[in-house]
Image (cartoon, rainbow, N blue to C red):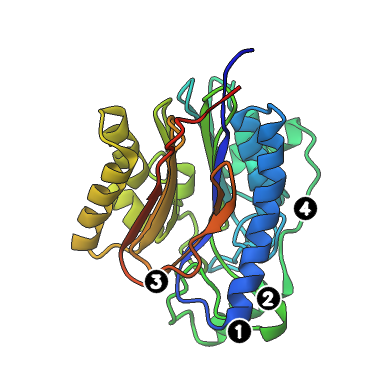
Amino acid sequence: MKLQVQPKLIIHGGAGSSLHGKGGVEAVRKSLYKVVEEVYSLLCSGASAKEAVVLGCQMLEDNPCFNAGTGSVLQSDGQIRMSASLMDGTTQSFSGVINISRVKNPIDLAQALQSSPDRVLSDYGAAELARELQIPSYNALTDLRLQEWIQERQENFQRAMAGVVAEPELVESSNARRGTIGVVALDTHGKLAVGTSTGGKGFERIGRVSDSAMPAGNYATRYAAVSCTGIGEDIIDECLAPRIVVRVTDGMSLQEAMQRSFAEASQHQRDFGAIALDASGAIAWGKTSQVLLAAFHDGEKFGDTLEIPEGTEVGCIENVELGIRG
């Protein structure tokens, strides 16, 4: 019988301000675990890492609790502009869309561009691609995001809204949380893939580009894959995802690569988080922010990072069985 790798999966729904109250934590945990359960089942059925990543991103984009797809935040002019990217670790093919509007799942466009000679498209080009693919027009606006924008407009956009976790007191009944989403998967063939999607940081200058559609925030080789979340400009300044992946590719363990990269980030007072997998099946996460909304399946059980201590924190689950099953 051909040996196969035990699949592994980790996802995130943002990083930033503290979650207030146990009810908030449990609501986010339930949302994340639902995605992990369905995507991990797909991996166990033999699906590719890239297929699993796309499904996970679609599910998270469709959940209005997160700032990607449905429920994306509004920019300063009251418009929604979303960005997403996908990277196949085996082929090292990166593709993405920047500031796309009126589509339900930006990750679908990133997937469509995987085999294209032009693999990253912005606004008008991405919109034209959506038309070519006959993707229906879609309004991603939710009442919560509109209320946030109206409130900020009344205050002349004086309050910084770059934090990726919405305060529950904003709309108590909604249990809304704001955060970039990301998925990293290792499939039964030992291949890695990663995807990241976002609605931006909210109330930003028109034309601002997120790290989510750059290798800085979403990167993979056949050795490791990383998805980032948090303050996009901080992620870009650290070139965080490729920094971690290159260190693993050059021989450092995933845990060492995460620890060194986050120690450097802490010295620069960055505000972000990251999730990662390596080819051995090790699962890792790190944050300099107060909270990281991440959940994973290590091949045996679910786990999450919702209640780890505030401040810089790196966690890693090594694959002691080397990821092999008959």
Q: Earlier in the sequence, mark 2 or mark 4?
A: 4
Name the mark nearer the viewer: 3 or 1. Answer: 3
Name the residue type under label 1.
Leu
- Left or right: residue 210 versus residue 176 is left
Q: Secondary structure at mark 1?
A: loop
CA distance separating discs 4 and 3: 33 Å
- Left or right: residue 70 versus residue 117 is right
Numbered mark located on residue 144 in the image: 2
Name the mark nearer the viewer: 2 or 4. Answer: 2
CA distance separating discs 1 and 2: 8 Å
CA distance separating discs 1 and 4: 25 Å
Name the residue type under label 4.
Tyr
Q: Kindly identify the residue that appears in the image at 66 percent across and 80 percent down.
A: 147
Q: Is 142 rendered above or below residue 151?
A: above
Q: Secondary structure at mark 2?
A: helix
Q: Earlier in the sequence, mark 1 or mark 4?
A: 4
